[in-house]
Every structure is written in C-alpha cells, then in structure tokens.
Amino acid sequence: MKVPMSREAATTECSRRDALKAIAGAAAVGLAGRPALAATAKTAMGSLLEIDPSPTHALSPYLYMQFMEPLGVTDSSVEAAWDHSRNDWREDVVDATRELGPTMMRWGGIYTDFYRWREGVGPRDRRPMMQNLQWGGLESNQVGTPEFHDFCSRVGADPLMCVNFESDGRRRFMSAGGKPRIGDAREAADWVSFCNDPDNSERRELGYRATMPIRYWQIGNETSYDRQGFDYDTTARKTVEFAKAMRERDPSIRLIGWGDSGWAPRMADAAGEHLQMLAFHQMFNPDADEEPVLRGERYRRDPEATWRRLMAAWEINDRKIREVRESLGDRDIDLAMTECHFAIPGRDRCDVLSTWAAGVSYGRILNNHQRHGDVLKIATAADFCGNRWQVNAVMIPTPRGEGRAYLMPVARVMQLYRRHIGTEALRVNSTPDGLDVVASRKGNRVFLHVVNTNRDKSVTARLRLGDVRPQSATAHVIEDDPMVEVSQLNSDRVMQTSSHNWAADGEWDFPGASVTAVVVSLAG
C-alpha cells in the first residue's frame, strides 16, 4: 500500500537518508564557566558561528509538548494538581504552566489502557472512583475530559488525547473488580463525537453545551512493549478499525498510530493512509551500560563525572530517533515522540534532574529534536507535573502551604526555547568548539538555541549569516553552577533567565554551562 503524502510542513528535496546525513553534519558541528556576558577584543581561530539564512523546512509548534498522566500513588500528578476544596485546578499549577507556555498537552499513557472516558464526564458527585491498575491507588475521576480541555484552554495548549485501544491487548488491564475496563473502536469514536460534534446529544444532556474541540488523537500506547499485548498484525488491523470509526465522526481529526520497536515501516504500509503520524517513546538511563554516576545521590560525589555523563546523554536520544526515522526509508509519514525523559534510579526517581547540569543536558536533547524537525513533529522531554518524580516539568509542593508550583530545569529550557523559536529551520554550517547550536527563522528574525557544553569555560563566537546583514541581537541566557538544585525553597532565585543586547556584528561570549536563545533581527 502506498503511503500518501502527509507532510503539513515544507520539506527539503533530499530523501530521508540524505536528510539524516545533513543532520549528522549539523550535529558534528556542535560536538566538540561563569564569566559575564561581554564582547571580547578579537575573534579567536575557529570561533565563527556560520548559519545559512535560507530556510530548509518548516518546524512544528509542538516540539515542546507536555504529557499528563494520572500516576496514582507513584506520583500524585493529576490529583495533586486538582484543588478538591474548590473543584478546580490549583491556581499555582495553572500559573506555572502559563509561564511554561506549552503548545500541546497530552492526556493518557498506560493509564488509557483501563480508562473509560464516560466515568470522567458529567456531575462530579456521580463520577465513580476507579482503580489505577498500573500505578496503584484510586483515581477520583474529578479530572476528566472537560477539566483537561479546560486546563488546556487556560494555558493556551492544544490537547492531544490517547484512547483506550482495547487495553492494547494487555489482559491485566481488561477488568477490575469484575467490571470491564476495555474500550473498543465504538467507544473511541463516541469520545470524538462527545468532544467535537456541536450537536452531540450525550454531551448536551450532561449540561455541556459548548464543544471541547480535540484535533489530535493517539491510537495505541506502547503497544509493542508487552509480549502479552497485541502483536503487530493485530495492532495494524485494529488501528485501521479505530481510525475509520473515529474519522467517520470527525474527518478533520489528526491520528497518531503506534510505531516503536521496529513497527514503523510496517505500520506505515498497513495503516499509513489513515494516520498522520507514528508514535514512539524513549525513557532512557545514560548510566545503563557503564559504572553508575547519576544514580541516587552519587551525582553529588563527582561533579565532573556527572557533567561528562549528562553532556553525552543526547547521543542516546539521537540514536533512538535515527533508528525510527531511518527504518521508514522513503515512506512519507511524520513522527511523534509523545513520551521522552531520563529514567535514572533514585530516592525520588531521577534526583539528578533537579540540577542545572541536567538542564544543560536537556538543552542538547531539545536541540537534537529540532535537528530532526523535518520529520519529528511532536516531541517532549518530560512528564508534565507531580509532587515526587523529578522527571516532571512542573513540581507541586505538598502540603500546599510549603510553596507554590515551580519549573524544573528541563521546563526552564523548554520555556526559553519555546518563547524564542522560528517557524522554519536553518542549517548551521560551523560553530566554535564546545557549542551545540540549532537555528530557525521567522520573517526577518533568526533564532539560535546555543548550549555551551563546557562546564566552566566560556566560548566566544562571531555570527555570519551568509550575505544577510544582521542588524541587532538579544541574548536570553540561563547560566548557573551546574550542581545547583532547584526546589520550592529557591525556585525564584536559581536558574533565572537574563537578557542582554549584543552588537550583531560583534563577538558574543557564551558562559560555561549555559543555555542561550539568541534573537537576531535582520536588516531590511
């Protein structure tokens, strides 16, 4: 079966393999501590930062997606974010998320394997409690489709919903307490109608007159990860069944199928005409194959080793993306990395992720996502919120009186990049040693995301944009001691963004262990 063109963005004329070579070259350019931002007297050899100002392809606005999944007793993510005394979201969580500024929020994960969406709509005093079969404990269902959609509306994010894909074939999720937890294609299609159909009688009878528009829907979640779940052939057949049923209710929706574990090319062939994207996940441990440095509190004992390990972590991320996209060959279907973060054992799971060293590491990972932006259209680098796991973007102090919700290091980098990024990618031709750089453009402005991979050494650079003359430049930079850790006690003092005006034709100094977004205005 020929997969139809599904690219919403402009793409280069090269094949996927040619594009991968281009990405490899761009990454190689950027492979190779605390001084103030200032111009220096003379450009050092090799300090040229050369950008081709001609756009290569469009960048998706969804490269900094946030993922919300009720995590039960493991991490009180959704329940901790909900104020049961007011029947509303905690105001500090809403405020922190608005500050973060995600363009997309995803609801679901493994939770959707046993989630029945009708239990989370209608009067709250009639919503049944449900057992969280994956993460333990009970879920109140006080947060359901209306509340999730309301949250997205408040923070300016597009919602992405995962459907119950017949429990992904996992028998342990198909029933609880003698009651079925499996959701079929009809149930998923009814959900689409409930949200998007202005005349949906079920929604209106429950008192919701306005629609709750959801354009993006994911079919299947980590389906290939469980040997007792659906095999590939079953997944492909049921994906087509679900897609047809859901799109019959709303032809305009955008559908994402499961494509990890080597399934991507076969899923594209079997179901590609019904899908816009294929999803894959990456939760990875940079310590997995070596002597552990980052596990538990060990990262505090050797800051230099911690820095080296974190600066190399992006390579694992890059291998995963390359594996999926290269497997597609010339098939024209986009990719969605709908879950991605570190997974390092520790007291609170991934304790090291509260350090600024982890923030700089995530800067490299987010740069890598942008390099693959010709095909990667949805991506994240964190779970969204919670009160324990350090993989979250937003941490929620509990009890509530102990502080307000705050942004983790990964979220501070996401926020910085999200606020300063163009709509079209540019090619980075050369960079000074130690800098990892990606570039984009929107109209007469060029945006650079720059990570200084040196722990305590600044790097000087002079910009060249081909024949285009830069007129002015503003640098928005986060720099701090790599071993500083953020908490509710210091969240308003550490890892802060400062802004500086730079001479566009002068030399720029990037501090060690810094992440910078540079906005360059072009003449004319």
Image (spheres, rainbow, N blue to C red):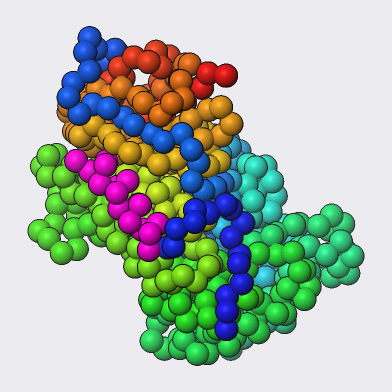
Q: Residue 386: where, in percent of width, then height?
A: 46, 51
Task: Specify start and end residues of the magenta stretch as a single range.
Answer: 17-33
Q: Is residue 177 at all visible to an observer of this figure?
A: no
Q: Nearer the viewer, residue 169 or 417?
A: 417
Q: Residue 31: where, in percent of width, then height?
A: 23, 43
Quadrant containing the N terminus is bottom right
Q: Nearer the viewer, residue 7 or 250?
A: 7
Specify whether 164 is left or right of 291. right
Specify whether 376 is left or right of 480. right
Picture quadrant of residue 383: bottom left
Q: Does residue 14 show up magenta in the picture? A: no
> Seen from this angle, which residue lies furthest front?
467
Looking at the image, which residue is at 45% across and 40% down?
A: 426
Q: Residue 222: where, in percent of width, then height?
A: 45, 74
Q: Residue 143: where, in percent of width, then height?
A: 64, 58
> Seen from this angle, which residue lies furthest top?
41
Looking at the image, which residue is at 49% across and 56% down?
A: 13
Looking at the image, which residue is at 65% across and 42% down?
A: 156
Looking at the image, which residue is at 37% across and 29% down?
A: 516
Q: Please determine whether, in this image, residue 171 is positioned above or below residue 435.
A: below
Q: Is residue 425 at all visible to an observer of this figure?
A: yes
Magenta stretch: dominant secondary structure? helix
Picture quadrant of residue 219: bottom right
Q: Please determine whether, in this image, residue 448 is positioned above or below residue 19.
A: above
